[in-house]
Amino acid sequence: MTAANTEPKLPPVPKGGKIKHAMSLGIDIWNNLDRYQEEYGDSFTLTLPGQGPMVWTGDPEVVRDTFALKPEQYDPFSVQIPIDVGEECVLFENFKKHQDSRKRIIPSLATAQLKNRAGVMHDIISEHIDSWTVGEAFNFPRIVGDMTLDIICYTLFGLREGERKERYKELILGWLTTSTNDTMFTIGQLYGARKFRAKLNAKYRQRTQEGKMGNLKKGLLPWKQPLDYKVQLAQMIREDAEGIRARMDENEAHMLSVFARAKYDDGEFLEMEKVISECIAMMVAGHETSAATSSWMLIWLLKNPQVMAKVRQEIADSVAKVGEYDPLVISELPYITACLNESQRLSPSAPATVRWLTDDTQLGKWLMPKGTCVSPCMYLTQRRKDIYGEDAHQYRPERWLDGSCKPKPWEFFPFGGGRRACAGMAQARQQLRIILAEIVRRVTFESNEEYVHTDALPTPRLVGGQTEPKDGVWVTVKAVLPKETGITQFKQSA
C-alpha cells in the first residue's frame, strides 16, 4: 500500500511549457509518453492551453482509484474534446442524465441486436472486398473507413442503399475529415479544446437558427467548412427524426429511431439537439475507432505472418465445423479475439480516458488538487512488464489463451473503465472482428512499408481522439478469394 499525501500535490511537470506539451500529444504521441514516463515516473503532469493541469498516469493504483470515482467527484462536461459533437452528448452528462442516456443506448447495442446486425455487417464488408482487384494499392485506414461508413448508415439510419444513404455518407465523411484535420487540431490545442468546442457549437446553433446551410466550400476561416457540413448533416437527422416521431413505428430498430422515440420521465420527447448529438457521437466513435484499431491490428499481422496464418486456419476450421460462414460465430473465435486484445493492448486507438476532479481527491499515492484532469493512459498501463511479463512489448496473442494474461479492469481498458466505459464496446469489438476476419480470410496483402519488416511501429498521430499511423498503412492486394471459398468446398465434400 502506498503512502498518501496530506496536502494536494501534482506529479512532476516535464520541461517545455504549454505549447510543447500540447504538440507532444499530436504527432509521435507514444514515444513522447514513453519519454515522459522514463524521465518523470508513472504519473506526470502536462499543462495545456486553455485548461487546468492534466495528469497522465500508467500507475495501476491511480487508474483503479480513478475508475472507482463517484459521479459527484468528477465533471464530464470539462472533457477536452476539440470537435463539436454537440453539448448534449452522453459524453458530457452526469448523474441521472448520464444513467438514462446509457439505458437508451446499451439495449440497442446488446447481444440480441448484435446477432441481428452481424449478418448485415458481413454483407457490407463482403461487398467492399468484392470490389477490390489484384494489384490495387490503397491506404488501409481509409478503406476500413469506407466500410464503417456503410455500417454506420445501416446501424444509425437503417439505410443500405439509395440517394439518402449516399448523401449521409458524403456529409458524415466531409464533417469528420474537415473537423479533425491538422489545422483544426492545432487550433483546438492552442485555444483550449473545451473552449474551442463550445465556440464551434455556438456558431452551429446560430447558423441553424438563421437557416444558413452553407455551400460546403472552404472559407477564410478554417471552421467554415466543417460548420457547413455539420449544419447540413444535422438538418438531415432532424428531418428523419421528425418522420420517425410522426410514424412511431416500433418495428424500426436503428439507433436514430431509438433516440427519436425516446422520452423523458415526464413523457416529453428528447430535445432534437440531444438526438442529433447522440447520433454524431456514434458516427465519430464508429468510424474513427474502427479505422484506427483495424490499422494497428493489420500492421501487427503483417509483421507476424505466422499469426496471420493461424487466424486464417481458425476461420477455416470454424467454417468446416459449422458448415457455413457464420459471422457471429467467427466474431467470437478465441484466437482472433486474442489477436484483437493484443493489438489494443500494445497500440490502443484511444491513448487515454479522462476524469476532471471537482475536489481534492486521493488517487493512489497522490492527493490530486481540485480541477485536475486525471488521464488513465491505456498505452502506458497496458505495456507494463510487472503486469504482462518481460515480453510485454512483444505482440504475442497466445498470452490471452495460455493463462499467463489475466489483467484486472484497471490493467487493460481499451474502451475506458468504471461508470463511463464505452457504451458501444460490444458492437465495436464485434464489428472489428468481423471486418478483420473476413479480410484475413479472403485477401492477401503485401506492403513495402519499412516498419512491416522491422521491430519499429509507424509514427502515430492523434486524429479526433484516436491514434492512427501518421502516413496511413499502404498495402497492395496480391489475391482476393471468392466469398464462397471454403464454404462451397465443404458443402461439396459433405
Image (cartoon, rainbow, N blue to C red):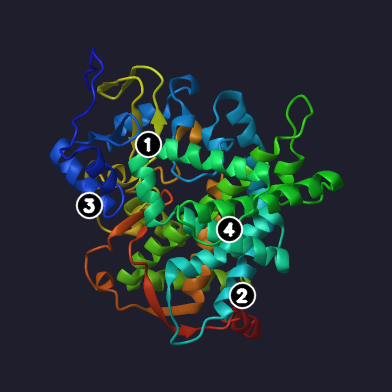
466 displayed left or right of 106 = left
Rendering coords of residue 7 (x, y %): 24, 13
Kindly report which numbered mark, 3 or 4, lies closer to the viewer in this rendering.
4
Which callout, 1 or 2, points to the residue nearer the camera?
2
Residue type at mark 4: give it: Ile
The amino acid at mark 2 is Glu
Residue bearing the label numbered 3: 31
C-alpha span from label 1 to label 4: 34 Å
Q: Nearer the N terminus, badge 3 or badge 2?
A: 3
Q: Is residue 390 left or right of residue 452?
A: left
Can you identify the residue that label 2 sits on? 127
Label whose residue precedes the other's in the sequence (3 or 1): 3
Q: Which amino acid does label 3 sit on?
A: Asn
Which circle marks residue 172 in the picture? 4
Q: Which of 90 and 242 is in front in this view?
A: 242
Query: On the image, numbered disc 1 is attached to which residue?
Result: 410
Q: In the rendered structure, which amino acid carries the disc numbered 1?
A: Trp
